[in-house]
Image (spheres, rainbow, N blue to C red):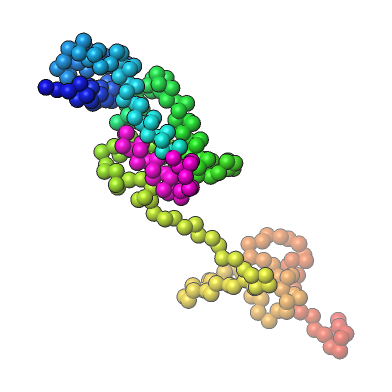
Amino acid sequence: MVRPSDTKARIQTVARELFAEKGVQQTSLRDIADRLGITKPALYYHFTSREDLLRSIVQPLIDDVDAFLADTEANAPQSPRELLQGYFDITFRHREVTMMVVRDLSTLAHLDLGSRMGHWRRRLITLLLGPDPDLAARARAVVAIGGLSDCTVEFADVPAETLGPRRWPRWRRSEPARRRPGESRVKRPHRAGRRRKADPRAPDMSGMTNRHRGNAPRCGTLSTSPQRHRSVTPPAHSNGRSTG
């Protein structure tokens, strides 16, 4: 003889399957009863309506997340990795419910799940970042929490132990080396064999003093200024007097 509790669990299992396949609004209690091979009055013995059945399926997820957050808030703070892993384990365990909600967003309105999920996220952000995080930190937290929720749907057939924050690599942000006060900047040595080629258009400036190099025409300039194109031959000097 089948016990009532076993029949109730079978009804919930079949309802989860049909809700995920067809959506909540497109699944009737007659569809569930037909797949189970029971009469509709027998189904009404356990659940008075489709909404009652839907709530019984979603309620374990709500209870588990609420209990996890309350326990975390009451005890010593966890590391961000441990906190996100605990949240992910719960949502992945109830991934069929998440998939059902994603397929039929009207479920959010039936059970007020939208406001509940928003409240969960705000509590998680407070546990991760404290009571007053800046906008950039909050944005990163929202991306992390939302990404974990997406994984429960995108990788529903993947074993749970292969996913989640525990599998994330430990990233270390590289920081530029800082110079000490008064320390000179170290120049990188030139690589051998990579000498800069001379530009054939550049004028020959060998033998010129630094005072006259500034008057030499530069490569690629088309200036017609006499100052730029005057003779670069330095004047002869004798005893500090010009020879004329």
Image point (71%, 70%), residue name: 216
| Residue 66 visible, this angle | yes
Q: Is residue 181 magenta?
A: no
Lateral position of residue 242 relative to residue 138, left or right: right
Residue 15 percent across, percent down from the top left? 25, 22
Depth check: give the residue in front, 147 or 33: 33
Up-down: is 210 above or below 122? Answer: below
**For residue 129, side relative to residue 63 (left or right):** right
Along the line of sight, which residue is nearer the eye, 201 or 176? 176
Residue 31 visible to the viewer: no
What's the residue at 48%, 41% (across, down)? 74
168 to 119, vertically: above or below: below
Name the one closer to the observer, 115 or 243. 115
Give residue 223's quadrant in the image: bottom right
Q: How many marks?
A: 0
Which quadrant does the C terminus fall into?
A: bottom right
Residue ID at (44%, 55%) = 171
Placement of the N terminus among the 4 image quadrants: top left
From what the image shows, is residue 115 above or below residue 154? above
Q: Residue at x 76, y 62 (%)?
A: 225
Does residue 77 show up magenta in the picture? yes
**Magenta highlight: main SS:** helix
The segment highlighted magenta reads 71-95
The residue furthest right is 241
Q: Residue furthest bottom?
A: 239
Image location (x, y in percent) of residue 215: 74, 70
Query: For this view, does 55 lie left or right of residue 13?
Result: right
Quarter assignment of residue 34: top left
Which residue is situated farthest in the top direction here?
Answer: 41
Q: Position of residue 2 (x, y in %)?
A: 14, 22
- Horizontal placement of 35 versus 122: left or right? left
